[in-house]
Image (cartoon, helix red, strand yellow):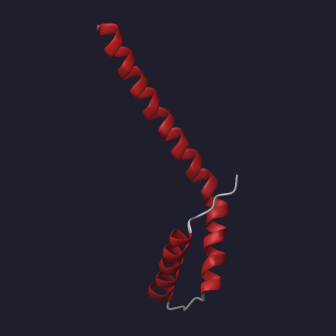
Amino acid sequence: MKITLKPEQRILLRQKIVAMFLDDFDEALSDFKADQILDAFIETLGPSIYNVAIQDMKIYMMDKLEDLDALFVKS
């Protein structure tokens, strides 16, 4: 699965990467380098984060279904 960002999200994240490198490492990054870093993080971390979010949502939905069962059993 390919994770894609909206253009506004990509711009904001690129700016944050550039600012972080400048603040933390005193290194100026071009937008091209920042995009490469962003793409590497998305490719490496994106699927794991996505899977955790799906699992969290599954647990949340199961809890809500149990709440519905409790409501109908009482009626």
| In this view, 12 is above or below 31 | above
Q: Is 60 situated left or right of 51 in this image?
A: left
Report the residue that reaches farthest toward the left.
75
Q: Is residue 60 above or below residue 16?
A: above
Residue 28 location, quadrant: bottom right
Lateral position of residue 31 relative to residue 73, left or right: right
Residue 30 image-quadrant placement: bottom right
| Horizontal and vertical percent position of residue 48 | 60, 51
Figure disc tally = 0
Judge left or right: residue 65 versus residue 71.
Answer: right
The residue lying at 35 percent from left, 22 percent from top is: 67
Dividing the picture into quadrants, the one containing residue 75 is top left
Residue pictured at 67% horizontal, 62% vertical: 43
Residue pictured at 58% horizontal, 88% vertical: 29
Residue 50 rendering spot, x and y as whole percentages: 57, 50
Name the residue: 60% across, 80% down: 34
Q: Residue furthest front?
A: 7
Coordinates of residue 62 in the picture (x, y in percent)? 46, 27
Residue 5: x %, y % from top left = 58, 64
